[in-house]
Amino acid sequence: MSARTAHRLVWLAALLPSVIFLAHLDASAIASTSAVLNSTGRLTGVAGLSMLLMAAILSARVPGFDRPFGGLTRLWRTHHLLGAWSLILLLLHPVLLAFSAAGASIDSAAATLLPPLSDLASWSGWAALVLMMIFLAPSFSFFGRPRYERWKKIHRLAGPAVALALVHDFWLSRGLPTWLDIALWSALALLAVGAVGWRFVFSRRIGRLAYTVSEVTAVANNVVELSLEPHGRKLRHEAGNFIYLTLEDASLAAGRGEEHPYTLSSSPDERQLRVAIKSLGDASRATQTIRPGTTARVEGPYGRFFVTPDRVPEPELWVAGGIGVTPFLARMRHLQRRGETADVCMIFCVQDPAREIFATELQNLADQLEGFRLNIHYFYREGPLSGSYLDEACPDISRRSVYICGPEPLNALVQQHAAAAGIAASRIHTEEFELL
């Protein structure tokens, strides 16, 4: 099953309650303008709640569940879209019902929007909607990019919002046969509760593996690579996967006990895990001073960057920007340890030689991998990566699959050049983190 098919199935499941609702409408639902508004208002409530529950289901973050969707980043894009549409539809829900009630009287419309305090069923819906506005608002770029940890804490309001929305629905839902209404929403509710339960309870107890920081290597200014030694069971992963890492060093100035996503830079057949961390925020900046012996917890693996992480079955172009070199480094280490050949043209984009992380190792690995070509692109000297540079460094780009990991401007630029070279979108693979 392709990733596109998997995402389409999620949307079909989210829309199924709406389809069932429409199938059970009768002629009275469109008999008048007021009836149409009432039916539309109820439909937005059904669609909004089902999308909210499906978004909750996708938040489970079970290792491996994201693979059919093309990785956790892509899965969570669908999660974010479902959340955004659920908020829009549930905001329309009371407004449309109020317009419908206005056909009877203004007092009826006002009572719909501001019911008596004794009407707990209606107020549970309003409470759910307010909580949704609070925890979803920071996700919209209109409000600026939120701080990661603050965003995570606010997102915990999703649980109470879902619970209150379900109370509202079970109390007031109408339009479906009772047995079908109960069966439909109970099934979605159980899946959502199970997902939230795994995410916030069970994954913390059985989904995290214990590690110790055994070595800290400064690979460049403001970049360190941590080597992690397992306590017991070792994480099994592929090149290009990422993990959530939690560090428990009491001396950390920030980030202690917080989980953060990092791409693994180690080969899957190494005993230790390795992650390269660049100083980009308070937590990653504090990590630059982490000490060997620090207890760490690892959850994962997640992501699916490389289609075939163990080998290079066809010509490939790799474009890395800055710390985005880590998945490529992991794959190079893995290919070298396996003695594989690799028809790969790699372009590593950095600002200047001082920020060229893993420079020596990358060159050594490139020399050892038969068929591998490494190009270093310096922004300070050559400017943004251009189509002419790509053509010169990789003249046969049109016959290659393309892998990109780096800042969004570089990502977009390479995708544009690759498309212009006639490379199909299905052969262009990208990796980036967006509020995971």
Image (cartoon, grey):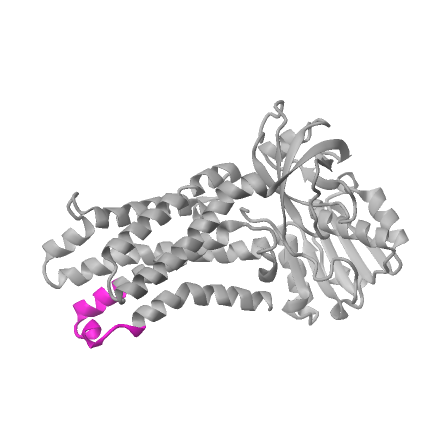
Is residue 81 shown left or right of residue 269?
Answer: left
Write down the region rendered in magenta: 23-41
Q: In which quarter of the image is residue 285?
A: top right
Magenta span has 318? no
- Quarter of the image for residue 265 reads top right
Front one among 68 and 320: 68
Q: Residue at x 77, y 52 (%)?
A: 331
Quadrant where the N terminus lies?
A: bottom right
Residue 52 percent coordinates (x, y): 39, 55
Residue at the spot x=49%, y=51% of the render?
A: 59
Q: Is residue 28 magenta?
A: yes
Asked where in the image residue 65 lies, by quadrant, the reply is bottom right
Residue 378 visible in the snapshot = no
Q: Can the viewer see residue 402 in this picture?
A: yes
Q: Is residue 214 above or below residue 163?
A: above
Q: Which residue is drawn at 81% across and 60% down?
A: 344
